[in-house]
Image (cartoon, rainbow, N blue to C red):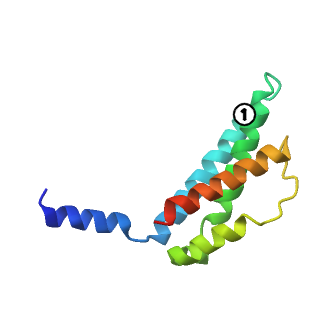
């Protein structure tokens, strides 16, 4: 691959693609929801499954909120919305331990901020 082709590939990777992001967020939300259903059937086996459930429920809440939104149009709007999400008040969302849920919810949001702030 020549240098020009490599630069084109790098630019394409760096370009902002709201549709791709939205589809990615929807996929992650669906996978988290599917995993929650799977884990919920195993909750009685060990308490660890409650933490796993809360983690994936938090992931579902974050990524389900993000897909198909107008703030995905620009990176700046997206980062601003992510920062706003950190202060959202979330009621007990069906989780087993709200502190665990909230810790993971903020972790996923912060990871997205870090990944897209460059």
Question: Which residue appears at 71% of the width and 53% of the height?
Answer: 105
Observer-nearest of 78 and 87: 87
Query: Percent position (x, y) of residue 97?
Result: 85, 42
Which residue in the rendered view is the most extreme toward the right? 92
Residue 42 visible in the shown view: no
Which residue in the rendered view is the most extreme toward the top? 45
Query: Percent position (x, y) of residue 6?
Result: 20, 61
Q: What residue is pinned by disc 1? A: 39
- Give the side of residue 13 with respect to residue 35, left or right: left
Q: Residues within 10 Å of mark 1 (few under 14, many from 20)?
A: some
Mark 1 residue element: helix
Observer-nearest of 95 and 110: 110
Query: Percent position (x, y) of residue 89?
Result: 83, 64
Quarter of the image where one finds residue 55: top right
Residue 115 visible in the shown view: yes
Above or below, 58 relative to 118: above
Question: Which residue appears at 81% of the width and 27% of the height?
Answer: 47
* Quarter of the image that includes the C terminus: bottom left
Quarter of the image where one finds residue 114: bottom right
Above or below, 6 relative to 54: below
Question: Which residue appears at 17% of the width and 64% of the height?
Answer: 5
**Number of residue marks:** 1
- Give the side of residue 7 with respect to residue 45, left or right: left
Query: Percent position (x, y) of residue 101?
Result: 77, 47
Question: Which residue appears at 79% of the width and 34% of the height?
Answer: 50
* Quarter of the image that includes the N terminus: bottom left
């Amino acid at each position: 691959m020549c240098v020009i082709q490599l630069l084109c590939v790098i630019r394409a990777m760096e370009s902002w693609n709201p549709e791709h992001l939205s589809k990615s967020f929807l996929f992650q939300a669906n996978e988290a929801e599917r995993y929650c259903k799977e884990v919920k059937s195993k909750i009685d086996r060990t308490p660890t499954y409650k933490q796993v459930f809360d983690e994936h429920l938090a992931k579902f809440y974050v990524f389900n909120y993000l897909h198909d939104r107008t703030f995905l149009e620009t990176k700046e709007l997206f980062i601003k919305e992510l920062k706003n999400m950190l202060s959202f008040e979330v009621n007990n969302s069906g989780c087993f331990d709200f502190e665990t849920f909230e810790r993971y919810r903020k972790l996923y949001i912060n990871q997205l901020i870090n990944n897209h702030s460059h």
